[in-house]
Amino acid sequence: MAHFLVFLGTVRDSTPPAPARLGLRVARACVQLLEADGATVELIDPLDIELGNVFKPHFAYPTSRVPAALDSLAGKIEAADGYVMVSPEYNHSMSPALSHLLNHFGSSLFAFKPSAIITYSAGQWGGARAAVAMRTFLSELGCLPVSAMIHVPRAQEALDEDGGFQDDPDRWAGYFGRTLGQLGWWAEAAGSHREKQDPTEVSPAFQRAPDQRNAP
Ligand SMILES: Cc1cc2nc3c(=O)[nH]c(=O)nc-3n(C[C@H](O)[C@H](O)[C@H](O)COP(=O)(O)O)c2cc1C
C-alpha cells in the first residue's frame, strides 16, 4: 500500500483572521481519509522544521554538513509514493510557508510521483486562485498533480478542529475521495513502473545545475 506525505501550508500565528492555522483541519481530514483507504501517511508541519533566516536548500550543502532536520525530510520525500499539498490562499496565491519549505528540496526527490492539490479559505472561493498556480509549481517539482483538485470554502465551518466534516460528511468524503482516489491510483501505477524501470535511465537527474536541461 502506498505511503503519502501530507504537507501543511500554514505557520500563521495571528488572529484576526480567526481561527489561526485553519489548514490543520483540512490536513487532518486528508490524513484520516487516506488512512481509511489503507495508506500510510505522515503529516509534515512546517512549524516542526527549523529552516533558519537565510535560504539554503538541502542540495546546496556538502553531504556531510546537511542540517539534520532538512536531511530527515529529504529522506521522507524520497521514500514517499506521493504527496498531498494543503495550501491556504494568501493574496490569491499559494501559501508562502509551503512554497518556502518545498523550495528547500530538489525535484529529483519528488519526481515520477503524483501529488494532489488541496486549497482552502475562510471565504467563499476555497483557494481556487492559489490552486491554479500550484499546478505549475508542482509540475516543475516533478510530482505531477492529478487532474481533480479539492477546494474547501469556509473551512472553519466545514471542518471541526480534529478534521471531522461538520455537515454532510458522506458528500464531503466523496468530494475528497475523487482527488485522493486519483492520487492513490497514480501512486500505485508509478510505484509499479519505478520497480520495472529506473526513471533516471530515461531522464537523468541534474548532477550540477538545472542548465543541464538547456537546449544546445
Ligand atoms: C496574508 C493573508 C492573505 C489572505 N488572502 C486571502 C485570499 O487571497 N483569498 C482568500 O480567500 N482568503 C485570504 N485570506 C484569508 C484566509 O483564507 C484565512 O485567513 C485562512 O484561515 C488562512 O489559512 P490558515 O489559517 O491555515 O493560515 C488571507 C489571509 C491572510 C492572513
Image (cartoon, rainbow, N blue to C red):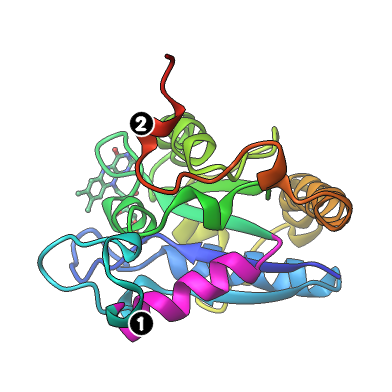
State which quadrant residue 72 falls in: bottom left
Front-most of residues 22 and 189: 189
| Residue type, numbered disc 2 | Asp
Residue 136 lies left or right of residue 200; in this view the side is left
Front-most of residues 23 and 86: 86
Question: Real-space Cα distance between discs 2 and 1?
Answer: 28 Å
Main secondary structure of the magenta stretch: helix
Mark 2 and mark 1 residues within 8 Å of each other at the beta carbon: no
Residue span colored magenta: 66-81
Q: Position of residue 129 (x, y in %)?
A: 41, 30
Q: Position of residue 51 (x, y in %)?
A: 23, 72
Q: Is residue 73 magenta?
A: yes
Furthest-left residue in view? 53
Q: Is residue 180 magenta?
A: no
**Sequence-wise first label, 2 or 1:** 1
Q: Which residue is mark 1?
A: 69
Q: Is residue 199 above or below residue 10?
A: above
Q: Position of residue 28 (x, y in %)?
A: 58, 72
Furthest-front residue in view? 216
Location of the C terminus (image quadrant): top left
Residue 165 in view: no
Find numbered disc 2 in the image and state the secondary structure of the residue it sits on: helix
Answer few, some or many: residues within 10 Å of disc 1's Cα (few below 14, many 20 plus, some between 14 and 19).
Answer: few
- Residue at the spot x=29%, y=55% of the render? 100
Q: Which residue is mark 2?
A: 211
User: What is the count of numbered marks?
Assistant: 2
Find numbered disc 1 in the image and state the secondary structure of the residue it sits on: helix
Q: Is residue 61 above or below residue 91?
A: below
